[in-house]
Image (cartoon, grey):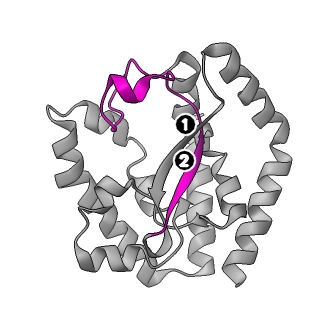
């Protein structure tokens, strides 16, 4: 209950304080390229329940028909403004709405698409999906340059499935087993630190 109360309070505060920025971003997206402001995608949440994650749209509206689900390197499907939003993780801010709804937490394992969750080992799936997925976690911090890593691979899909995903799942399992309020605050602090370093 304490974690959920913190999530709601934190998400509401962020959305309220950043509302002018979020409105400006929404307007810029509309001016930059054709299509909706938000990108919605099915992800797998707590206990395997599917939900639609919210992000600011960073790719051209026909992107799904023009390439793979993974975004790799300097993907030509990414809009000019979208590249900026991705670099500074601003595209993730709408997920605070997912937190208010109850689909997500501020801190927790990042939610995956059903296709990749189906590849999780059974024991790992049980652990990782036992908690609400989060906007940020240890795996997100350690693999913040995942896009560039996959861009250097001759086979990005294979690299993700065989190397990146298992490593990230290890971080996720560790989080679930060791999670605490203090640990969540430390992860939030590290996330802000990494974001400001990028700036």
Label 2 secondary element: helix
Main secondary structure type of the part rendered in magenta:
loop
Nearer-the-camera pick, 122 or 4: 122
Q: Which image quadrant is residue 146 in?
A: top left
Up-down: is 163 above or below 155? below
Locate residue 129, reporting x and y percent. Answer: 42, 73
Q: Residue at x 39, y 30 (%)?
A: 64
The answer to if 89 sits in the magenta stretch is no
The residue beneath circle 1 is: 198
Q: Residue at x 55, y 52 (%)?
A: 52
The residue beneath circle 2 is: 194
Q: Residues within 10 Å of mark 2 (few under 14, many from 20)?
A: some
Q: Are marks 1 and 2 in contact (CB under 8 Å)?
A: yes
Span shown in magenta: 49-78
Q: Is residue 134 left or right of residue 173?
A: right
Q: Residue at x 67, y 78 (%)?
A: 3
- In the rendered image, the quadrant that contains the N terminus is bottom right
């Amino acid at each position: 209950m304490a974690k959920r109360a913190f999530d709601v309070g934190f998400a509401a505060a962020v959305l309220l304080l950043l509302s002018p920025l979020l409105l400006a971003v929404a307007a810029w997206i509309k001016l930059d390229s054709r299509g909706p402001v938000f990108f919605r995608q099915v992800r797998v949440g707590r206990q395997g329940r599917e939900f639609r994650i919210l992000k600011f749209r960073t790719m051209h509206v026909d992107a799904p028909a023009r390439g793979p689900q993974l975004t790799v390197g300097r993907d030509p499907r990414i809009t000019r403004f979208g590249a900026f939003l991705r670099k500074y993780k601003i595209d993730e801010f709408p997920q605070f709405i997912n937190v208010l709804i109850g689909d997500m937490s501020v801190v927790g394992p990042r939610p995956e698409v059903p296709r990749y969750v189906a590849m999780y080992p059974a024991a790992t799936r049980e652990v990782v999906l036992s908690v609400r997925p989060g906007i940020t976690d240890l795996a997100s911090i350690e693999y913040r340059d995942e896009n560039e890593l996959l861009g250097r691979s001759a086979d990005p899909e294979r690299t993700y499935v065989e190397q990146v995903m298992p490593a990230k799942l290890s971080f996720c399992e560790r989080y679930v087993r060791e999670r605490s309020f203090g640990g969540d605050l430390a992860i939030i602090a590290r996330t802000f630190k990494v974001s400001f370093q990028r700036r």
